């Protein structure tokens, strides 16, 4: 150990996945394959339905298309490798590929935080400042906000990933998780991880808290404005335009807040696996369902997409 104390000797990691459930791996493979297929096809369907309907060529649905693209990329970084581990004995991943997976997963998660905040701002302008909406949320502005979400997301995790990649890993190399995440990797390091853990927790908390706070503030103004609408029909119509987004926000932030906004040493890996499954696998599957069920215009567009006629046009 002394001769290896100043450098990383691990060249690959072994992703253990769910060793206690090994007897039902075939069943888990089928279950997560169905979930992944539904997630990809569901988000692609939403994406195409929005593009084909001229009534949906507005910023709200433009942002929804970006969210769908993020969800497809987000789950694709994790699930295919996990599926292969259920049916093959090869669960290894190279050190470099592990860092790439960590970076892509973290980037897409951060991008989604920024995009959800952007979508909340869009709803704030539409409901609280309807007379100025067209001048403030122009096509150029919406493009800039969407692009900024992607760019900001891919910049945010650079420092944490670099810090983790510079840690010393001298063995063991078995990652007690189903993908390369920061917490299980920190537990494998032979060097002190205090600074890295503090930096990651601080940056993650700052990102999550800031984006969540801005989203909450937007909805405080939105709900306040909706309650001032005199007619019940008007209030219900206004709330329906943001109900889907609010539902997604509650699910998304509920899971990532439980995971990342506290010191990593307090986490149980088994508990963390369940939370990770929720926001890496389940949440991306739920988004198309939430938007198609709760948004009348999306439902109408999907019916047209599949060749079904409505009794009345929306």
Image (cartoon, grey):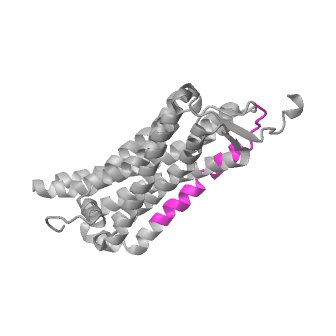
Location of residue 229 in the rendering, given as x and y in whole percent from the top left corner: 15, 56
Q: Residue at x 45, y 54 (%)?
A: 40
Figure quadrant of the C terminus? bottom left
**Residue 276 makes an appearance in the image:** no
Q: Nearer the viewer, residue 60 or 29?
A: 29
**Residue 96 makes an appearance in the image:** yes
User: Relative to 32, is 142 above or below?
Assistant: below
Residue 84 position by quadrant: top right
Q: Residue at x 55, y 61 (%)?
A: 151
Location of residue 244 in the rendering, given as x and y in whole percent from the top left corner: 30, 52
Q: Which residue is drawn at 28% across and 64% down?
A: 126
Location of residue 130 in the rendering, given as x and y in whole percent from the top left corner: 25, 67
Report the magenta residues as a range.
146-171
Q: Which of 65 and 143 is in front in this view?
A: 65
User: Relative to 231, is 4 above or below?
Assistant: above
Q: Which of 49 and 57 is in front in this view?
A: 49
Location of residue 41 in the rendering, given as x and y in whole percent from the top left corner: 42, 56
């Amino acid at each position: 150990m002394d001769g290896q104390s100043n450098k990383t000797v691990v060249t690959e990691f072994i992703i253990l996945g769910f060793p206690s459930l090994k007897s039902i791996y075939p069943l888990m493979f089928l279950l997560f394959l169905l979930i992944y297929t539904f997630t990809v096809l569901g988000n692609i369907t939403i994406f195409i339905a929005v593009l084909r309907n001229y009534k949906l060529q507005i910023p709200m649905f433009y942002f929804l298309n970006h969210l769908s693209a993020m969800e497809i990329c987000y789950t694709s970084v994790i699930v295919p490798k996990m599926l292969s581990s259920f049916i093959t004995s090869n669960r290894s991943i190279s050190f470099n590929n592990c860092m790439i997976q960590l970076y892509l997963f973290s980037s897409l998660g951060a991008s989604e935080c920024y995009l959800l905040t952007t979508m909340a701002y869009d709803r704030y302008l539409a409901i609280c400042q309807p007379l100025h909406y067209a001048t403030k949320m122009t096509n150029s502005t919406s493009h800039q906000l969407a692009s900024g979400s992607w760019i900001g997301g891919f910049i945010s995790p650079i420092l944490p990933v670099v810090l983790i990649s510079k840690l010393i890993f001298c063995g063991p190399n078995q990652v007690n998780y189903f993908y390369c995440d920061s917490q299980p990797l920190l537990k494998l390091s032979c060097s002190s991880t205090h600074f890295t853990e503090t930096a990651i927790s601080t940056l993650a908390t700052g990102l999550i808290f800031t984006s969540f706070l801005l989203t909450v503030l937007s909805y405080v103004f939105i709900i306040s404005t909706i309650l001032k609408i005199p007619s019940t029909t008007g209030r219900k119509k206004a709330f329906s335009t943001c109900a889907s987004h609010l539902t997604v926000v509650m699910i998304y932030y509920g899971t990532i807040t439980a995971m990342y906004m506290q010191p990593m040493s307090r986490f149980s890996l088994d508990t963390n696996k369940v939370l990770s499954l929720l926001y890496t696998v389940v949440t991306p599957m739920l988004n198309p369902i939430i938007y198609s069920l709760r948004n009348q215009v999306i439902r109408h567009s999907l019916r047209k997409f599949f060749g079904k006629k409505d009794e009345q046009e929306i």
